Amino acid sequence: MAKQTAPLRTTADPADGSTRAAGTKPDSAVVRDALGVGIAVGLSGFAFGVTSAGSGLSLLQTCALSLLVFTGASQFALVGALAAGGNPYTAAAGAFFLGVRNAFYGLRLSQLLALPRALRPLAAQWVIDETTAVTLPQPTRRAARIGFTVTGLTLYVLWNLTTLAGALGAEALGDTDAWGLDAAGPAVFLALLAPMLKSTTERVTAALAVLLALGLLPVLPAGVPVLLAASAAPVVLFLTGRAKGHGRGGTEAGDAGAIRAEGGR
């Protein structure tokens, strides 16, 4: 008897009248989303260029940070700590620990994208918050690769161009604090982070980290509060684990009592 196979489900694409497999996403929609994120965030490189130049870094140092580090939160943390008079080693440590999260992104993206080995070292430079946010929701590997590539390329080019423009224009702007550009980077980062905080545990962790950073800022050297704020995650995880453990213990005790009661009858 011949084995029957289910027909491939397709849906009509209203853009051009063609059909595509159910559960997929048009390439044009992926490109549109990727360009939106890449352009919106890439333009904030101007704020980094101005802030970096205002903190005393040279044009070459500022551009090298964007070209080689290419993770906005770490870059702003570094130049912000230096501008506040922090120790360079402490500032670099804070920037490093902020960038460590990208390694965890890479573990997930490497499985999802499955890029050839020769391309992986190059793609690693683009593993950041924005490319991860665009890539992970994609329904297929093709869409994920398109989203990752377009977001990474757009953001990398724009971020570096606007960094250069910001560093060159820093002298013309004068006092960067008066313009409030030093807050642009953190504001963009928070705008990207906020929609990701979906569970109560995630929100509590973020709130505790903010309280730690703000509370320690007046009493500790620049850069140190950021490092200590990272301790919010293990603290919340520990407390959550204990709460779940007590809950399981209470349930097990109740089950044991019920068993004994059944045996007594």
Image (cartoon, rainbow, N blue to C red):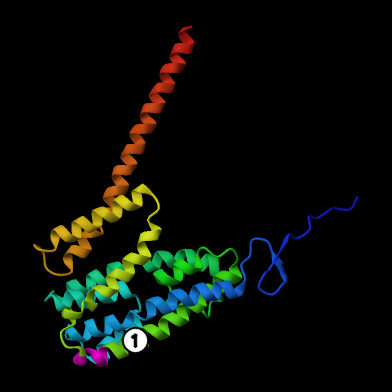
Residue 115 lies in magenta, yes or no? no
Q: In which quarter of the image is residue 131?
A: bottom left
Q: Is the magenta stretch mostly helix, strand or loop?
A: helix
Question: Crowding near pointer 1: few (<14 within 10 Å), some, many (20+)?
Answer: many
Counting the numbered discs, the total is: 1
Residue 121 appears in the picture as rendered: no
Question: In the image, is 84 to the left or to the right of 160?
Answer: left
Q: Position of residue 116 (x, y in %)?
A: 56, 76
| Residue depicted at 66% across the width and 73% down the height | 15
Q: Position of residue 190 (x, y in %)?
A: 32, 65
For this orientation, the residue located farthest to the top is: 265
In the depicted view, which residue is nearer to us: 15 or 138?
Answer: 15
Is residue 133 toward the left or the right of residue 113 in the image?
left
Q: Which residue lies furthest to the left in this view?
A: 219
Q: Which of 231 and 260 is in front in this view?
A: 231
Residue in the image at 16% along x and 78% along y: 82
Determine if residue 113 is in view: yes
Q: Which amino acid does label 1 sit on?
A: Thr
As drawn, 42 above or below 112 = below
In the rendered structure, the answer to whether residue 177 lies left or right of residue 152 reads: left
Indicate whether 26 appears above or below 195: below
Find the magenta span and give its range: 167-172
Frontmost residue, 241 versus 82: 82
Kindly state the secondary structure of the residue where label 1 is placed.
helix
Residue 117 position, x and y percent, is 53, 76
Q: Image point 23% across, 71% down: which residue?
A: 93
Residue for badge 1: 162
Q: Which of 165 and 265 is in front in this view?
A: 165
